[in-house]
Amino acid sequence: MTVRDILTYPDPRLRTLAKPVEQVDDTIKILIEDMIETMYAADGIGLAASQVDEHLQLVVMDLSKERDAPRVFINPKITVLDEEKLPYEEGCLSVPGIYDEVERPREIKIEALDREGNPFTEIASGLLAVCIQHEMDHLNGKLFVDYLSKLKQDRARTKVTKLVKAQKA
Ligand code: QAP
Ligand code: CO
């Protein structure tokens, strides 16, 4: 397994629209393993394939405290069950050091394939609902900072660019 590089804001490749996974073959399985390892190495709770420059509809997540319960969502689709929106303080591995509140529908239905390619359905609220909506935005080329004011976006861009330069130096 390999830790892959995570694209950072404002890299234009983060705006690429992800394509559906056609077949859960060995290449996809390796990508899934690499994404899980990359998420753990970066101390994240969720990672979309777009963030490692693989433009496929694939998300990994681990919301467990022990960090031993990785979950995989292939070709996820959501249906909003409750339009009521709740604010949650979000962050993103592609926007390191930036955290801010985003409002999203509080209850959704998730339909996806698991890592064996078997379909499943799940009703989600709380952190799972927030996280899957955040990750699915990535698959559509959208970032959580897009919901913030232009001023906050400018500040985030400056801060992340500096941080990334400092890390490389
Ligand atoms: C998305 O985000 C998310 O800035 C996943 O320095 C976040 O894993 C969904 C992270 C919150 C719902 C709520 C961010 C790690 C991790 C950073 C992450 C950082 C180190 C973000
Ligand atoms: Co993110």
Image (cartoon, rainbow, N blue to C red):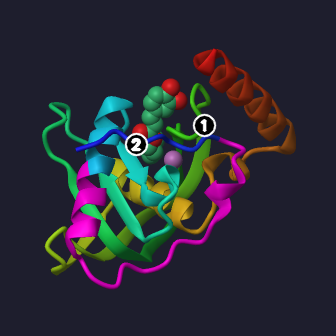
Residue identified by numbered label 1: 95
Span highlighted in magenta in the image: 9-33
Please identify the quarter of the rendering in which residue 80 is found. Answer: bottom left
Q: Describe residue 117's horizontal placement relative to residue 34 as left or right.
A: left
Q: Is residue 32 above or below residue 45?
A: below
What's the amino acid at mark 2? Answer: Arg
Quadrant hosting residue 101: top right
Tell me the residue at 29%/42% (across/down).
2
- Could you say where residue 97 lies in the image, as x and y percent from the top left? 58, 25
Provide the residue designation for mark 2.
4
- Left or right, 91 with reference to 23: right
Residue at position x 38%, y 31% from top?
42
Front one among 114 and 99:
114
Residue 132 position within the rendered picture, expressed as x and y whole percent measured from the top left: 40, 59
| Circle 1/circle 2 CB separation < 8 Å | no
Q: Residue at x 31, y 58 (%)?
A: 31
Q: Quadrant of the C terminus?
A: top right
- Residue 62 point in image, percent of width and height: 26, 45
When the figure is inspected, residue 29 is found, relative to residue 60, above or below; the finding is below
Residue 25 is covered by the magenta coloring: yes
Whether residue 123 can be seen here: no
**In the visual, does 121 lie left or right of 100?**
left
Q: Residue furthest bottom?
A: 22
Q: Nearer the viewer, mark 1 or mark 2?
A: 2
Q: Name the one closer to the observer, 150 or 49.
A: 49
Amino acid type, callout 1 = Val
What SS does tag 1 mark? loop
Left or right, 165 with reference to 49: right
Vertical comparison of 95 with 121: above or below: above
Of residues 81 and 43, the one nearer the viewer is: 43
Q: Quadrant of the N terminus?
A: top left
